[in-house]
Amino acid sequence: MTWTTLQTAMADQGYIASGDLSMALHLSLSLGRPLLLEGAAGVGKTEVARVLAAVQNTQLIRLQCYEGLDAAQAIYEWNYQRQLLAIRAASEDGETGKTVEARIFSDEFLLERPLLKAIRQDKAPVLLIDEIDRADEEFEAYLLEILSEFQVTIPEMGTITATTRPMVILTANGTRDLSDALRRRCLYAHVPYPDHGTELAILITRYPDITDRLCAQIVGFVQALRKQELEKKPGIAEMLDFAAALMGLGVADLTMDPAILQATLTTLLKTQMDRDAIPTEIAQRLAGKAA
Amino acid sequence: MSLVTKFAARDPGPAARMAGFVAHLRDNGFRLGVGETGAALDALTHINAANPYDSRRALKSLFTGCTEEAAQFDGLFNSFWMNGGRVKTRVTATPTQSENVQSSREASEEASSGTGDMSASGGVDGEAESDGEGKLVAMNVTNLFKKDLRDFVRPEDIAEAEKIALRLGAALRDRRSRRRKAALKGDQIHFRKVMRKSLATGGEPFFLPKRQRPDRTLRITAICDVSGSMTVYSRIFLAFLAGLMRADFRADAYLFHTRLVRITEALRDKDALRALARLSLLAEGFAGGSKIAESLDTFASTYGRRFVDNRTVVMILSDGYDTASPDGIFDALARLKMRGCKIIWLNPLKGWDGYEPTAQAMAGALPHLDLFRAANTLGDLAALETEMARL
């Protein structure tokens, strides 16, 4: 598979990827290296993993990071309740210590969390580690071991080596700086807001029955809106919501009714300050330019 | 394709060229090891390496690690592999040249982000032209119309300011609360949680959850006056702001003359000099007049509502020379104060013998200030540490 065939395969699944991104994905697949995706919220970083899993026809395993995420929640944990029950039952049956110990520290009592699960699949899955910059630095260190060795050491059971190498995608949007060690181990792709042509293609892929005129207006309007000084610039998901809202309301032309346009802006602007920053006159001017 | 660099006949082969390219990137501030060179050669076997655009994309994903590097990469790739018969020494960037390249690239961030696609769609010649000429023009224009802040601030100052800012940040802890909260690491055992968790394991306390007094740092929001009367002190204050931004990722910075500009993002740039170059662009009107009351009012009604709360210290760096009436400043500070923040005013003139805050603006501000001190030098700022600890 070359990077262009990957690009078309992803387009068939409804994801329009830029050249840089498809190349990075292709290399990541062929070199077996993790891929770090960075970009503003709402540009479709998480979606990449979902689509890639669909293209590869494999499972998607997702680990959502958050502050305080620890090894027990990300790698593995013993099922203490079941272990205790097993010990009680064993003592009633008169089982001896050694055999009980061997039994309660076996696979049966192991709770797999995403990272361990990902390296024990028969078919290599896509492992998505979402918003890695939200996790603590300690967790990043755990991750380094797993990403370079693809093995997990469980003191009671020994080392578990990967049966297949998962395809790893990490996403970040700059909550904090990632360590150089992690960056070095990953391939990197920056996912920007889509340009005009790409965004048109995305909109048409998602809503094939939209009229050309409205389609061009929506994309022109959203692109112009992103150039305004906003707290939170509208992403692709917001643009699609906006299009869905307009189509649902039966709008054929963006400049037709200022009141409707202003009302549908709720799908694009998500803070009070941003709403205040785009009053009717500015919205009309942007829409007029886009038309 | 005619633009692809012609290497000398004695050139030992692709591996050496790749090593040369990695060295070229290192010269331009990329942190790459030996492993990357090997990985790059490996990567090229998986693609059509004869196509320079494919190679550029592949090497870009491999060699870059952050947004800034990604923005820089296309230019560096072109200058090494596609210098189109230009004399090599002219393109290989020496350290001083590379600063120019970086700053002018930042100056036209929008334009530079598009160059990769432009050349890919066939506009190779156009791009090569503008790459050579555009930089010169851009730099001249910058120097003519705006003061280049890099002339004012030296990197050593920033490094020193960074240390001071770190110490100030550490001094500004909120020590009011005695309550401890559950935490991954803590100095005490969280007994209530131990009991609750032990229920699941039949009364055996397997886990020992910890608790800790939460770390409540005060956030510094600095507002710096860069009007004409402040020019002599700007060097110190801007260095301090740059240091503050690099030391404390929660800090926030603004500057104002006749209007207010948020400079937090610009100053967070990893490259200190480039940060100042970006700042120069933002600080249009630098060393002009000042409208303190209006700027503070804008701050209180816009950014202040988002970023200022009761764990914020608003630090105003200004001499207080304003033409407007003192009521404006009084009202603006009153509004800020209502958000529960602390306000510090650092006035360079206060260091003078016999200074009285007679400037009208200053007189209007005084009732709202938690701390009013002199600050002309980095040393003065460092001396604030003990005072700020008492806030």
Image (spheres, coloured by chain):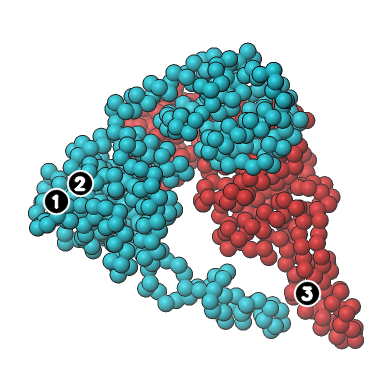
Tell me residue B320's x, y (percent). 17, 50
Kind of residue indicated by mark 2: Ile
In the figure, the shade used to draw chain B is cyan
- Name the kind of residue labelled 3 in the image: Arg
A102 left or right of A52 in image: right
Do labels 2 and 1 touch, CB within 8 Å? yes
Which residue lies at the image location 51% right of the left edge and 26% below the top edge? B114
Q: Identify the residue position indicated by label 3 in the image.
A: A82
In whole angstroms, how far apart are the C-alphas of marks 2 and 3? 68 Å
Residue B52, compared with residue B275, is above or below; it is above
Please tell me whether mark 1 sits on a helix, a strand or a loop.
Answer: helix
Sequence-earlier tag: 2 or 1:
2
Judge if badges 2 and 1 mark residues of a common chain: yes
Chain containing the residue with disc 1: B
| Quarter where residue A49 is shown | top right
CA distance separating discs 2 and 1: 8 Å
Q: Crowding at label 1, few (<14), some or many (≥20) Cα neighbours within 10 Å?
A: many
Query: Which residue bears the numbered disc 2?
Result: B292
The chain to which mark 2 is attached is B
- Figure check: A286 above or below B324: above
Residue B83 showing in the rendered view: yes
- Tag 1 residue: B361
Q: Are marks 1 and 3 in contact (CB under 8 Å)?
A: no
